Image (spheres, grey):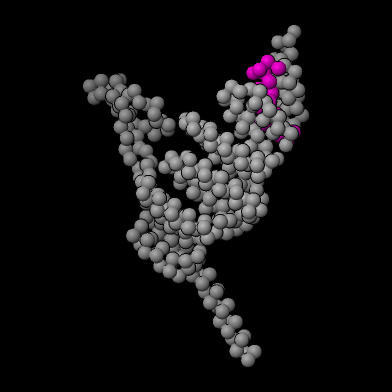
C-alpha cells in the first residue's frame, strides 16, 4: 500500500513539474511571436495556452499585451503652420516648404501613435479577468492604468487607482510583481507609482483631473494618515487655486508626518515668500540648510541672503 501511495505521489509531482515547464514554454513562445509580429500565430498560441493553463496570471497579461499591441497604430498627421503648437515632440516633425519659395513654411508632417479603443477594450477585459483571479498582481494594476491613460479615460484611471488603494489595505500591501515575485516593500513601491500618476495628472491640461487628484489623496489620507505625498499634493492643488491659507495648512500636515522631507520644506518656504511671511520663509530655508542636499543647501543660502538684504 505504501509503495502504491509513493508511486501516486511521484506521478503527481511529475505532473505538476511538467505543467510548470509547459507554462514557461508557453510564455517564451508568446514573447518570441510577439517580437516577430506574428499576430495570427500568436492568437492561436494564446487560445491553446488558455486551454492548458487557464488560471495562469501570465496568460492574462499576454492576452492584454496582444490586444494592446494590436490596437497601437502609427498615423501620419499634416498640420498647417499655425498648428505647430499642437505637436508635443517637435524634434520628430518634418517641415514642408513652398517649392517656389523654400523659405516659406506651408505645413508640418509628423507621425503620431493612436490606439483603437475597441481592441484596447478587449485587452482590458482580459486584464480585468486576470485581476479578478489574481488581485495582488500590482504589475497588472499598473498596466491597466497605462492603457486607460493611452485612450484618455482619466476618470476610469482614477477609479482604478482608488481600487488599488482599497486593495492595498486588504492585502496588507503584500503585492506581487512580474512573474509573481513578491515586492520587498509593496507599500513604498505602490505609493511611488501612485505619486507618478498624480504628477502626470498635474501636467495634463484638463481642469477636471484636479478633482481626481483631490479624491485620490483624500482616500490615501483616510487609509494612510501619515502619507506625506497626499498632504503635499493637496497643498499643491490649493496653491494653484491661490488658496494660500489652505495650502499652508496641508503643507504643515505633510511636514508633521515627515519634518525632514525637503520637498515639503521647499514648498513651505516658497509659499511663505509668496505671501510675504519673511519669518516663516527664513525658518524653512533654515531647515533646508539642515536637511537638504548640497544643491538644496546652496539654493537655501541664496534665498536667505536675499531675504536678509531685502530687510535692511
Secondary structure mainly formed by the magenta segment: helix
Q: Is residue 12 left or right of residue 92?
A: right
- Which of the 4 quarters of the picture holds residue 100? top left
Q: Is residue 169 left or right of residue 260?
A: left
Report the residue that reaches farthest toward the bottom. Answer: 1
Query: Which sits in the foreground, 298 or 255?
Result: 255
Query: Which sits in the foreground, 283 or 25?
Result: 283
Q: Is residue 205 above or below residue 160?
A: above
- Which of the 4 quarters of the picture holds residue 287? top right
Instruction: Write the residue at 63% across / 29% down.
Output: 235
Q: Is residue 14 magenta?
A: no
Instruction: Write the residue at 66% across / 53% down.
Output: 172
The residue range painted magenta reads 258-277
Q: Is residue 191 above or below residue 203?
A: below
User: x%, y% of residue 306?
Assistant: 70, 15
Q: Quadrant of the C terminus?
A: top right
Instruction: Write the residue at 31% across / 26% down.
Output: 80
User: x%, y% of residue 138?
Assistant: 56, 52
Q: Is residue 242 above or below residue 68?
A: above
Count of all numbered marks drawn on residues in the image:
0
Q: Is residue 284 visible?
A: yes
Query: Which sits in the foreground, 137 or 217?
Result: 217
Q: Is residue 54 left or right of residue 38?
A: right
Q: Quadrant of the N terminus?
A: bottom right
Q: Is residue 273 magenta?
A: yes
Q: Is residue 173 visible?
A: no
Instruction: Write the residue at 48% across / 58% down.
Output: 129
User: x%, y% of residue 190?
Assistant: 61, 47
Amino acid at each position: 500500500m505504501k509503495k502504491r501511495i509513493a508511486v501516486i505521489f511521484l506521478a503527481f509531482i511529475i505532473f505538476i513539474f511538467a505543467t510548470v515547464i509547459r507554462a514557461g514554454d508557453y510564455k517564451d513562445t508568446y514573447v518570441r511571436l510577439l517580437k516577430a509580429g506574428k499576430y495570427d500565430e500568436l492568437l492561436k498560441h494564446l487560445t491553446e495556452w488558455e486551454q492548458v493553463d487557464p488560471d495562469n496570471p501570465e496568460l492574462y497579461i499576454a492576452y492584454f499585451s496582444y490586444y494592446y499591441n494590436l490596437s497601437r497604430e502609427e498615423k501620419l498627421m499634416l498640420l498647417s503652420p499655425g498648428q505647430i503648437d499642437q505637436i508635443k515632440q517637435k524634434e520628430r516633425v518634418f517641415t514642408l516648404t513652398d517649392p517656389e519659395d523654400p523659405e516659406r513654411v506651408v505645413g508640418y508632417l509628423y507621425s503620431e501613435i493612436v490606439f483603437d479603443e475597441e481592441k484596447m477594450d478587449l485587452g482590458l477585459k482580459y486584464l480585468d479577468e486576470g485581476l479578478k483571479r489574481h488581485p495582488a498582481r500590482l504589475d497588472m494594476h499598473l498596466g491597466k492604468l497605462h492603457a486607460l491613460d493611452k485612450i484618455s479615460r482619466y476618470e476610469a484611471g482614477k477609479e482604478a487607482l482608488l481600487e488599488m488603494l482599497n486593495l492595498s489595505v486588504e492585502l496588507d500591501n503584500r503585492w506581487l510583481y512580474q512573474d509573481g515575485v513578491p515586492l520587498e516593500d509593496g507599500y513604498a513601491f505602490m505609493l511611488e507609482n501612485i505619486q507618478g500618476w498624480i504628477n502626470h495628472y498635474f501636467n495634463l491640461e484638463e481642469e477636471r483631473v484636479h478633482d481626481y487628484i483631490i479624491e485620490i489623496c483624500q482616500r490615501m489620507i483616510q487609509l494612510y494618515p501619515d502619507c506625506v505625498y497626499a498632504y503635499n499634493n493637496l497643498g499643491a492643488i490649493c496653491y494653484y487655486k491661490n488658496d494660500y491659507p489652505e495650502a499652508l495648512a496641508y503643507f504643515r500636515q505633510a511636514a508633521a508626518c515627515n519634518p525632514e522631507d525637503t520637498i515639503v520644506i521647499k514648498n513651505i518656504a516658497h509659499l511663505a515668500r509668496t505671501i510675504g511671511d519673511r519669518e516663516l520663509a527664513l525658518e524653512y530655508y533654515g531647515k533646508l540648510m539642515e536637511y537638504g542636499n548640497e544643491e538644496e543647501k546652496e539654493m537655501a543660502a541664496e534665498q536667505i541672503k536675499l531675504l536678509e538684504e531685502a530687510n535692511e
